Amino acid sequence: MTPSVHHPAMPRIPAIPGTRVPSHSAHASWLRKEVSKLCMTDNQRFPGAQPISFLNTHFAQLEAEDFWVCEKSDGIRALLFVHLKPNGHQTVYLLDRHNDYYELSGLSFPRHQHPNLPLHNTIVDGELVYDVDPRTNLETLRFLAFDCLVVDGENIMALSLDRRFDLLHKRFHNPFVRAHHQAHAPAGTPFDIRIKQMQRSYGTALVFAEAASLEHDSDGLIYTRVNAPYTPSTTSSIIKWKPRSENSIDFRLVLCFPPGHHDRPLKPLFLLHVWCGGDKYEPYDELYVTDEEWEAMRCSGEQYHNRIIEARWDRQHHHWLKMRFRDDKPHANHKKTVENIMKSIDHGVEQHTLLERCDSIRAAWKARELRYGRLGVSRWSRVGGPPTVAGMRR
Protein backbone atom coordinates (compact mmCIF):
# COMPACT_ATOMS: atom_id res chain seq x y z
CA MET A 1 0.00 0.00 0.00
CA THR A 2 1.48 3.36 -1.06
CA PRO A 3 0.49 6.42 1.00
CA SER A 4 -0.82 9.42 -0.95
CA VAL A 5 -0.50 13.14 -0.29
CA HIS A 6 -3.41 14.67 1.59
CA HIS A 7 -4.60 18.19 0.77
CA PRO A 8 -5.60 19.71 4.12
CA ALA A 9 -8.35 21.84 2.55
CA MET A 10 -9.96 18.80 0.97
CA PRO A 11 -10.68 16.14 3.62
CA ARG A 12 -11.65 12.90 1.97
CA ILE A 13 -14.13 10.21 2.83
CA PRO A 14 -12.73 6.87 1.59
CA ALA A 15 -14.18 5.01 -1.33
CA ILE A 16 -14.47 1.25 -0.95
CA PRO A 17 -11.38 -0.28 -2.58
CA GLY A 18 -11.38 -3.41 -4.70
CA THR A 19 -13.35 -4.70 -7.66
CA ARG A 20 -17.09 -4.33 -7.23
CA VAL A 21 -19.09 -7.51 -7.77
CA PRO A 22 -22.09 -6.60 -10.00
CA SER A 23 -25.10 -6.24 -7.69
CA HIS A 24 -27.49 -8.41 -9.68
CA SER A 25 -24.98 -11.09 -10.64
CA ALA A 26 -25.12 -14.71 -9.55
CA HIS A 27 -21.82 -14.12 -7.75
CA ALA A 28 -23.31 -11.31 -5.62
CA SER A 29 -26.41 -13.36 -4.89
CA TRP A 30 -24.28 -16.27 -3.74
CA LEU A 31 -22.15 -14.00 -1.51
CA ARG A 32 -25.23 -12.55 0.20
CA LYS A 33 -26.62 -16.02 0.81
CA GLU A 34 -23.28 -17.22 2.18
CA VAL A 35 -22.96 -14.27 4.58
CA SER A 36 -26.58 -14.70 5.68
CA LYS A 37 -25.90 -18.36 6.39
CA LEU A 38 -22.73 -17.60 8.35
CA CYS A 39 -24.54 -14.90 10.38
CA MET A 40 -27.57 -17.16 10.87
CA THR A 41 -29.98 -14.46 9.71
CA ASP A 42 -33.27 -15.02 7.92
CA ASN A 43 -32.62 -12.27 5.36
CA GLN A 44 -29.86 -11.18 2.99
CA ARG A 45 -29.60 -7.55 4.08
CA PHE A 46 -26.44 -5.83 5.30
CA PRO A 47 -25.78 -7.64 8.61
CA GLY A 48 -24.07 -4.79 10.46
CA ALA A 49 -25.39 -3.65 13.84
CA GLN A 50 -26.78 -0.11 14.01
CA PRO A 51 -26.68 2.18 17.08
CA ILE A 52 -29.31 4.39 18.65
CA SER A 53 -28.69 8.04 19.52
CA PHE A 54 -27.58 9.08 23.00
CA LEU A 55 -30.16 10.76 25.25
CA ASN A 56 -30.04 11.94 28.85
CA THR A 57 -32.01 8.86 29.83
CA HIS A 58 -29.11 6.61 28.78
CA PHE A 59 -27.03 7.60 31.80
CA ALA A 60 -29.16 5.25 33.88
CA GLN A 61 -28.28 2.41 31.49
CA LEU A 62 -24.56 3.23 31.66
CA GLU A 63 -24.74 3.11 35.46
CA ALA A 64 -26.77 -0.10 35.56
CA GLU A 65 -24.74 -2.21 33.11
CA ASP A 66 -21.18 -2.66 31.85
CA PHE A 67 -20.40 -0.79 28.63
CA TRP A 68 -17.23 -0.24 26.66
CA VAL A 69 -16.61 3.05 24.88
CA CYS A 70 -14.50 4.01 21.88
CA GLU A 71 -14.19 7.00 19.59
CA LYS A 72 -16.52 7.23 16.60
CA SER A 73 -14.38 7.61 13.49
CA ASP A 74 -15.54 9.81 10.65
CA GLY A 75 -15.18 7.19 7.93
CA ILE A 76 -17.04 4.57 5.93
CA ARG A 77 -18.68 1.58 7.61
CA ALA A 78 -17.80 -1.77 6.07
CA LEU A 79 -17.62 -5.46 6.93
CA LEU A 80 -14.57 -7.51 5.98
CA PHE A 81 -15.46 -10.99 4.72
CA VAL A 82 -12.75 -13.63 4.44
CA HIS A 83 -14.03 -16.61 2.46
CA LEU A 84 -12.32 -19.97 2.07
CA LYS A 85 -13.36 -21.95 -0.98
CA PRO A 86 -13.58 -25.76 -0.90
CA ASN A 87 -10.39 -25.92 -2.97
CA GLY A 88 -8.52 -24.06 -0.21
CA HIS A 89 -8.33 -20.75 -2.08
CA GLN A 90 -8.99 -17.72 0.11
CA THR A 91 -10.80 -14.64 -1.21
CA VAL A 92 -11.38 -11.40 0.70
CA TYR A 93 -14.24 -8.92 0.28
CA LEU A 94 -15.54 -5.71 1.77
CA LEU A 95 -19.29 -5.21 1.90
CA ASP A 96 -20.84 -1.79 2.37
CA ARG A 97 -24.19 -0.45 3.58
CA HIS A 98 -25.60 -0.95 0.08
CA ASN A 99 -24.87 -4.66 0.63
CA ASP A 100 -22.52 -4.48 -2.35
CA TYR A 101 -19.38 -6.60 -2.35
CA TYR A 102 -15.88 -5.56 -3.39
CA GLU A 103 -13.26 -8.23 -4.03
CA LEU A 104 -9.83 -7.30 -2.70
CA SER A 105 -6.39 -8.35 -3.86
CA GLY A 106 -3.15 -8.36 -1.89
CA LEU A 107 -4.66 -9.59 1.38
CA SER A 108 -4.31 -13.03 2.94
CA PHE A 109 -5.04 -14.20 6.47
CA PRO A 110 -3.49 -17.24 8.21
CA ARG A 111 -5.07 -19.42 10.88
CA HIS A 112 -3.94 -18.65 14.42
CA GLN A 113 -2.97 -22.23 15.36
CA HIS A 114 -1.77 -23.27 11.91
CA PRO A 115 -0.16 -20.20 10.29
CA ASN A 116 0.72 -22.17 7.17
CA LEU A 117 -2.99 -22.70 6.48
CA PRO A 118 -5.48 -20.02 5.34
CA LEU A 119 -8.03 -18.61 7.76
CA HIS A 120 -11.52 -20.04 7.30
CA ASN A 121 -14.69 -17.98 6.83
CA THR A 122 -14.51 -14.79 8.93
CA ILE A 123 -16.63 -11.61 9.14
CA VAL A 124 -15.20 -8.54 10.88
CA ASP A 125 -17.01 -5.26 11.55
CA GLY A 126 -15.17 -1.98 11.13
CA GLU A 127 -14.77 1.25 9.24
CA LEU A 128 -12.41 2.66 6.65
CA VAL A 129 -10.64 5.93 7.41
CA TYR A 130 -7.83 7.99 5.98
CA ASP A 131 -5.12 8.58 8.58
CA VAL A 132 -3.03 11.65 7.78
CA ASP A 133 0.53 11.85 9.09
CA PRO A 134 0.84 15.37 10.55
CA ARG A 135 4.57 15.51 9.74
CA THR A 136 4.53 14.39 6.11
CA ASN A 137 0.89 15.10 5.21
CA LEU A 138 0.72 11.61 3.69
CA GLU A 139 -2.55 9.75 4.08
CA THR A 140 -2.91 6.02 4.68
CA LEU A 141 -6.11 4.07 4.19
CA ARG A 142 -6.89 1.97 7.28
CA PHE A 143 -9.56 -0.51 8.26
CA LEU A 144 -10.34 -0.04 11.96
CA ALA A 145 -11.90 -3.24 13.29
CA PHE A 146 -14.14 -3.04 16.36
CA ASP A 147 -16.17 -6.27 16.43
CA CYS A 148 -16.34 -9.76 15.01
CA LEU A 149 -19.35 -11.81 13.89
CA VAL A 150 -17.69 -14.96 12.56
CA VAL A 151 -14.10 -16.10 13.00
CA ASP A 152 -12.39 -19.11 11.42
CA GLY A 153 -15.76 -20.62 10.50
CA GLU A 154 -17.30 -20.15 13.97
CA ASN A 155 -20.27 -17.84 14.53
CA ILE A 156 -19.51 -15.88 17.72
CA MET A 157 -22.38 -13.37 17.60
CA ALA A 158 -23.98 -14.84 20.75
CA LEU A 159 -20.83 -14.26 22.81
CA SER A 160 -20.28 -11.17 24.94
CA LEU A 161 -18.35 -8.24 23.52
CA ASP A 162 -15.21 -8.95 25.56
CA ARG A 163 -15.05 -12.51 24.22
CA ARG A 164 -15.67 -11.37 20.65
CA PHE A 165 -12.97 -8.73 21.03
CA ASP A 166 -10.52 -11.30 22.38
CA LEU A 167 -11.15 -13.60 19.42
CA LEU A 168 -10.84 -10.66 17.03
CA HIS A 169 -7.32 -10.13 18.36
CA LYS A 170 -6.19 -13.73 18.79
CA ARG A 171 -7.67 -15.42 15.73
CA PHE A 172 -7.78 -12.57 13.21
CA HIS A 173 -5.44 -9.65 13.75
CA ASN A 174 -2.47 -11.10 15.65
CA PRO A 175 -1.86 -13.94 13.14
CA PHE A 176 -2.10 -11.41 10.29
CA VAL A 177 0.51 -9.14 11.90
CA ARG A 178 2.81 -12.07 12.71
CA ALA A 179 2.57 -13.38 9.16
CA HIS A 180 3.86 -10.12 7.79
CA HIS A 181 6.36 -9.56 10.64
CA GLN A 182 5.30 -5.94 11.02
CA ALA A 183 2.58 -3.78 12.51
CA HIS A 184 1.93 -1.85 9.31
CA ALA A 185 0.43 -3.00 6.05
CA PRO A 186 2.91 -4.62 3.67
CA ALA A 187 3.35 -3.30 0.15
CA GLY A 188 0.60 -4.33 -2.25
CA THR A 189 -2.20 -4.47 0.32
CA PRO A 190 -5.24 -2.20 -0.18
CA PHE A 191 -5.16 -0.88 3.38
CA ASP A 192 -3.64 -1.20 6.83
CA ILE A 193 -5.63 -3.05 9.51
CA ARG A 194 -5.85 -1.90 13.11
CA ILE A 195 -8.03 -2.78 16.11
CA LYS A 196 -9.88 0.05 17.80
CA GLN A 197 -8.86 1.03 21.31
CA MET A 198 -11.63 0.41 23.88
CA GLN A 199 -12.12 1.75 27.39
CA ARG A 200 -14.57 1.00 30.17
CA SER A 201 -17.56 3.33 30.05
CA TYR A 202 -16.21 5.51 32.86
CA GLY A 203 -13.00 6.08 30.86
CA THR A 204 -14.62 8.64 28.57
CA ALA A 205 -11.97 11.25 29.41
CA LEU A 206 -9.27 8.84 28.17
CA VAL A 207 -11.13 8.36 24.89
CA PHE A 208 -11.40 12.11 24.36
CA ALA A 209 -7.70 12.51 25.14
CA GLU A 210 -6.72 9.72 22.74
CA ALA A 211 -9.03 11.08 20.02
CA ALA A 212 -7.16 14.39 20.09
CA SER A 213 -3.98 12.62 18.93
CA LEU A 214 -5.58 10.46 16.24
CA GLU A 215 -4.60 10.93 12.61
CA HIS A 216 -8.22 10.83 11.42
CA ASP A 217 -11.32 12.82 12.31
CA SER A 218 -13.41 11.62 15.23
CA ASP A 219 -16.97 12.91 15.52
CA GLY A 220 -18.29 11.25 18.65
CA LEU A 221 -18.34 8.16 20.85
CA ILE A 222 -19.77 4.66 20.63
CA TYR A 223 -20.90 2.87 23.80
CA THR A 224 -21.41 -0.90 23.48
CA ARG A 225 -22.91 -3.13 26.18
CA VAL A 226 -20.38 -5.78 27.16
CA ASN A 227 -22.81 -8.60 27.96
CA ALA A 228 -24.93 -8.17 24.82
CA PRO A 229 -24.74 -10.40 21.74
CA TYR A 230 -24.01 -8.95 18.31
CA THR A 231 -27.34 -7.92 16.78
CA PRO A 232 -27.52 -7.41 12.97
CA SER A 233 -30.02 -4.54 13.19
CA THR A 234 -30.67 -1.39 15.20
CA THR A 235 -30.01 -2.19 18.84
CA SER A 236 -30.20 -0.33 22.16
CA SER A 237 -27.02 -2.16 23.20
CA ILE A 238 -25.01 0.27 21.03
CA ILE A 239 -25.39 3.97 21.75
CA LYS A 240 -23.93 6.68 19.52
CA TRP A 241 -23.01 9.98 21.15
CA LYS A 242 -22.32 13.20 19.30
CA PRO A 243 -22.17 16.70 20.75
CA ARG A 244 -25.63 18.21 20.70
CA SER A 245 -24.44 20.85 18.24
CA GLU A 246 -22.96 18.26 15.86
CA ASN A 247 -25.80 15.76 15.58
CA SER A 248 -26.68 15.24 11.94
CA ILE A 249 -29.32 13.52 9.84
CA ASP A 250 -29.01 11.81 6.47
CA PHE A 251 -31.77 13.00 4.13
CA ARG A 252 -32.55 12.44 0.48
CA LEU A 253 -32.13 15.75 -1.31
CA VAL A 254 -34.87 16.55 -3.84
CA LEU A 255 -34.46 19.59 -6.07
CA CYS A 256 -37.81 21.15 -6.95
CA PHE A 257 -37.62 23.63 -9.84
CA PRO A 258 -40.40 25.99 -10.92
CA PRO A 259 -42.53 24.39 -13.69
CA GLY A 260 -40.88 24.62 -17.08
CA HIS A 261 -37.57 25.95 -15.74
CA HIS A 262 -35.48 22.80 -15.36
CA ASP A 263 -32.84 24.05 -17.80
CA ARG A 264 -32.67 27.60 -16.48
CA PRO A 265 -30.41 28.87 -13.70
CA LEU A 266 -33.32 29.58 -11.39
CA LYS A 267 -32.74 28.51 -7.81
CA PRO A 268 -34.87 25.50 -6.86
CA LEU A 269 -36.31 24.44 -3.55
CA PHE A 270 -33.97 22.03 -1.78
CA LEU A 271 -36.37 19.57 -0.17
CA LEU A 272 -35.19 17.11 2.47
CA HIS A 273 -36.98 13.75 2.46
CA VAL A 274 -36.89 10.98 5.07
CA TRP A 275 -37.07 7.28 4.35
CA CYS A 276 -40.23 5.38 5.30
CA GLY A 277 -39.07 1.89 4.33
CA GLY A 278 -38.95 0.11 0.99
CA ASP A 279 -38.88 2.71 -1.77
CA LYS A 280 -41.13 5.15 0.08
CA TYR A 281 -39.98 8.64 1.07
CA GLU A 282 -41.82 11.64 2.45
CA PRO A 283 -40.89 15.34 2.70
CA TYR A 284 -39.55 16.55 6.02
CA ASP A 285 -38.04 20.03 5.67
CA GLU A 286 -35.89 22.24 3.44
CA LEU A 287 -32.14 22.69 3.14
CA TYR A 288 -30.83 26.24 3.39
CA VAL A 289 -28.63 27.08 0.40
CA THR A 290 -27.28 30.56 -0.28
CA ASP A 291 -27.35 32.08 -3.77
CA GLU A 292 -23.57 31.76 -3.93
CA GLU A 293 -23.72 28.09 -2.98
CA TRP A 294 -26.39 27.44 -5.61
CA GLU A 295 -24.32 29.17 -8.28
CA ALA A 296 -21.33 26.98 -7.42
CA MET A 297 -23.53 23.87 -7.50
CA ARG A 298 -25.04 24.83 -10.84
CA CYS A 299 -21.66 25.49 -12.44
CA SER A 300 -20.11 22.28 -11.14
CA GLY A 301 -22.13 20.07 -13.47
CA GLU A 302 -22.51 17.61 -10.61
CA GLN A 303 -25.74 15.67 -10.06
CA TYR A 304 -27.46 16.63 -6.79
CA HIS A 305 -31.06 15.48 -7.20
CA ASN A 306 -32.03 12.37 -5.18
CA ARG A 307 -28.65 12.04 -3.47
CA ILE A 308 -28.22 11.28 0.22
CA ILE A 309 -27.02 14.36 2.05
CA GLU A 310 -25.82 14.71 5.63
CA ALA A 311 -27.17 17.90 7.19
CA ARG A 312 -27.00 19.54 10.60
CA TRP A 313 -29.50 21.79 12.33
CA ASP A 314 -28.37 25.39 12.84
CA ARG A 315 -29.91 26.21 16.20
CA GLN A 316 -29.15 29.91 15.90
CA HIS A 317 -30.83 30.46 12.52
CA HIS A 318 -33.27 27.54 12.66
CA HIS A 319 -32.49 25.86 9.37
CA TRP A 320 -30.65 22.83 7.96
CA LEU A 321 -27.13 23.21 6.58
CA LYS A 322 -25.27 20.88 4.24
CA MET A 323 -22.36 18.95 5.68
CA ARG A 324 -21.53 16.51 2.87
CA PHE A 325 -23.05 14.00 0.49
CA ARG A 326 -23.18 10.40 1.65
CA ASP A 327 -23.13 8.35 -1.54
CA ASP A 328 -21.95 5.40 0.56
CA LYS A 329 -25.43 5.10 2.09
CA PRO A 330 -28.28 3.42 0.18
CA HIS A 331 -31.04 5.31 1.99
CA ALA A 332 -31.67 8.38 4.08
CA ASN A 333 -32.30 7.89 7.79
CA HIS A 334 -35.59 6.18 8.54
CA LYS A 335 -38.42 8.37 9.78
CA LYS A 336 -38.24 6.81 13.25
CA THR A 337 -34.48 7.30 13.38
CA VAL A 338 -34.96 10.95 12.46
CA GLU A 339 -37.40 11.34 15.35
CA ASN A 340 -34.82 9.91 17.76
CA ILE A 341 -31.99 12.06 16.41
CA MET A 342 -34.19 15.13 16.78
CA LYS A 343 -34.56 14.24 20.45
CA SER A 344 -30.77 14.26 20.69
CA ILE A 345 -30.65 17.62 18.94
CA ASP A 346 -33.33 19.10 21.19
CA HIS A 347 -32.37 17.37 24.44
CA GLY A 348 -28.89 16.05 23.74
CA VAL A 349 -25.89 15.73 26.04
CA GLU A 350 -22.77 17.85 25.73
CA GLN A 351 -19.24 16.64 26.42
CA HIS A 352 -18.91 18.30 29.82
CA THR A 353 -22.03 16.48 31.03
CA LEU A 354 -20.60 13.13 29.91
CA LEU A 355 -17.42 13.81 31.83
CA GLU A 356 -19.30 14.94 34.93
CA ARG A 357 -21.19 11.63 35.03
CA CYS A 358 -18.08 9.43 34.73
CA ASP A 359 -17.57 9.30 38.49
CA SER A 360 -21.08 7.97 39.10
CA ILE A 361 -20.70 5.46 36.24
CA ARG A 362 -17.42 4.25 37.76
CA ALA A 363 -18.93 4.05 41.25
CA ALA A 364 -21.81 1.94 39.93
CA TRP A 365 -19.38 -0.35 38.06
CA LYS A 366 -17.26 -0.86 41.18
CA ALA A 367 -20.38 -1.46 43.28
CA ARG A 368 -21.35 -4.29 40.94
CA GLU A 369 -17.91 -5.80 41.42
CA LEU A 370 -18.32 -5.69 45.20
CA ARG A 371 -21.86 -6.99 45.05
CA TYR A 372 -21.17 -9.99 42.81
CA GLY A 373 -17.60 -10.73 43.84
CA ARG A 374 -15.17 -12.55 41.61
CA LEU A 375 -17.25 -14.31 38.97
CA GLY A 376 -14.69 -16.97 38.20
CA VAL A 377 -11.11 -17.69 37.28
CA SER A 378 -11.66 -16.69 33.65
CA ARG A 379 -9.47 -13.80 32.51
CA TRP A 380 -12.70 -12.46 31.03
CA SER A 381 -14.49 -12.13 34.36
CA ARG A 382 -15.79 -8.61 34.79
CA VAL A 383 -13.90 -8.31 38.07
CA GLY A 384 -10.96 -10.67 37.65
CA GLY A 385 -8.07 -10.95 35.26
CA PRO A 386 -5.06 -8.84 34.33
CA PRO A 387 -5.04 -5.02 34.26
CA THR A 388 -4.81 -4.96 30.46
CA VAL A 389 -6.93 -7.25 28.29
CA ALA A 390 -7.13 -7.18 24.46
CA GLY A 391 -5.52 -3.75 24.49
CA MET A 392 -8.07 -2.31 26.94
CA ARG A 393 -7.03 -1.07 30.36
CA ARG A 394 -9.23 -2.66 33.01
Image (cartoon, helix red, strand yellow):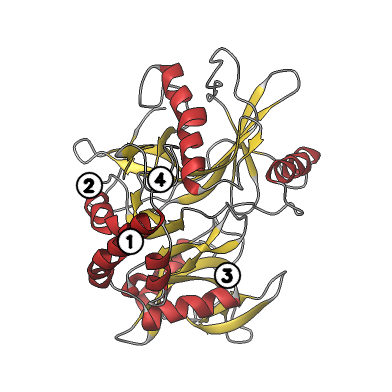
In space, the residues marked 3 and 4 are separated at their CA atoms by 27 Å
For the residues labelled 2 and 3, the Cα–Cα distance comes to 38 Å
Can you identify the residue that label 1 sits on? 367
Question: Residue pushed farthest left?
Answer: 135
- Which mark sits nearer the N-terminus, 2 or 1? 2
Residue 176 is situated, as x and y percent measured from the top left of the image, at 47, 24
Determine the residue positioned at 49% across, 48% down: 161
**Residue annotated with mark 3:** 305
Whether residue 289 is visible to the viewer of this picture, yes or no, is: no
Q: Nearer the viewer, mark 4 or mark 1?
A: 1
From where the camera sits, is residue 235 visible? yes
Of callouts 4 and 2, which one flags the residue occurring earlier in the amino acid sequence?
A: 4
N-terminal-most mark, 4 or 1: 4
Tell me the kind of residue under disc 4. Val
Of the residues under marks 1 and 3, which one precedes in the sequence?
3
**Residue holding disc 2:** 213
User: What residue would you read off at disc 4?
Assistant: 129
**Label 2 close to label 3 by CB (< 8 Å):** no
Q: Label 1 amino acid?
A: Ala
Task: From the viewer's perspective, tell me whether residue 69 is left or right of residue 188.
Answer: left
